Image: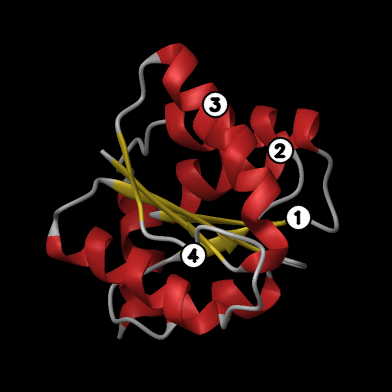
Amino acid sequence: MIAIGSDHAGILLKGEILELFDKIGVLYKDFGTYDESSADYPIYGKKVAEAVISGECEKGIVICGTGIGISIAANKIKGIRAALCHDVFSAKMTRLHNDANILALGARVIGAGAALEVVNAFLFTEFPGEKRHLDRIKMIED
């Protein structure tokens, strides 16, 4: 199960991602927002992060205009490693090296086509669990 949330700036891109999920059979829980009315990104970043930390969802995706603010908000929750990625290489590497559990996207920065490729790379790249990476993740969390 994937947690997903966005503010008003990310609502259209979130819709594109949800269409992809429906098409390929990815289960998700949408934490809002649900329309283009002005919305505060920290609310949605926190909701998604809490769903991931609680174990309700395996991973999360958060979206705002740039992806910066919502990633900062999500990273305030202990144990969250939210990574702002706008290319496939970064999305793969953040899973391989950082075991990132939330992907942040900037809807005003990346087009829908590229975003869907980034989402696929993030969701389907597994963390190998190598000791050197586990040690570095522990340093981040301490």
| Disc on res. 82 | 4
Judged from the image, the secondary structure of the residue bearing numbered disc 4 is strand
Identify the residue at horizontal 47%, vertical 44% (top origin): 95
Q: Residues within 10 Å of mark 2 (few under 14, many from 20)?
A: many
* Pair 3/4: label in front: 3
Circle 2 residue:
115
According to the image, label 1 marks what residue?
107
Instruction: From the viewer's side, name the closer residue of 10 and 117.
Output: 10
Pointer 3: what residue? Answer: 19
Q: Nearer the viewer, mark 1 or mark 2?
A: 1
| SS at circle 2 | helix
| Between discs 1 and 2, the one toward the N terminus | 1
Q: Residue furthest top?
A: 24
Q: Amino acid at mark 4?
A: Ala
Around disc 3, counting alpha carbons within 10 Å, would you say few (fewer than 14), some (14 to 19), or many (20 or more)?
Answer: few
Task: Confirm or deny contact between disc 3 and disc 2 (CB under 8 A).
Answer: no
Report x, y in % for residue 26: 36, 25
- The residues bearing labels 3 and 2 have C-alpha atoms spaced at a distance of 13 Å
**What is the C-alpha distance between the residues marked 4 and 2?**
16 Å
